[in-house]
Amino acid sequence: MNKVFPDVITQLPEAGLDLEGLRIYISHAETHEVWFLETDVEIDYPSHLHKAQWGIILEGTMEFTINGRTQTYTKGDRYFIPESVEHSIKMHAGYSEIIFLNDPNFLKK
């Protein structure tokens, strides 16, 4: 996989999700988190919901299924998921994005 993020990003704390091939570097703030996500394998992330999320795709392809409707996103596309909207994600190998989560403790729940 080509290196998408510079060392200043990859030296941030990692999310520690137990999904082989997925790396998430996290910048924490008092009111939110910013994730720098990349994967070199295909990942089907199950349906879930949380606070508002905004993202921009840097490389590759992913599909969001929201309210039963699936939409494909590719490099340069942006998306917004309002708070408490159930969704699932399929990320293809080579995928990367930057995500803003309106939650400072998303992974600590």
Image (spheres, rainbow, N blue to C red):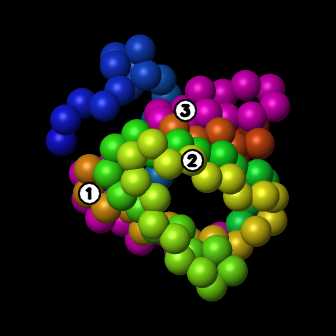
Most frequent secondary structure within the magenta stretch = strand
Q: Amino acid at mark 2?
A: Arg
Count of marks, rendered view: 3
Of the numbered discs in the image, which one, if any, rests on residue 78? 2
The answer to whether residue 72 is left or right of residue 35 is left
Of the numbered discs in the image, which one, if any, rests on residue 106? none
Of label 3 and label 2, which has the lower sequence position? 3
Gap in Å between the C-alphas at discs 1 and 3? 20 Å
Instruction: State the residue at coordinates (80%, 65%).
Output: 84
Above or below 2: residue 109: below
- Seen from the viewer's position, the closer of residues 13 and 86 is 86
The quadrant in which residue 8 appears is top left
Give the residue number, with chain letter if any, for mark 3: 26
Task: Report x, y in % for residue 61.
Answer: 36, 58
Extreme front residue here? 76
Instruction: State the residue at coordinates (71%, 58%).
Output: 81
Give the residue number, with chain letter if any, for mark 1: 93
Above or below 11: residue 103: below
The quadrant in which residue 23 appears is top left
- Report the span colored magenta: 21-48
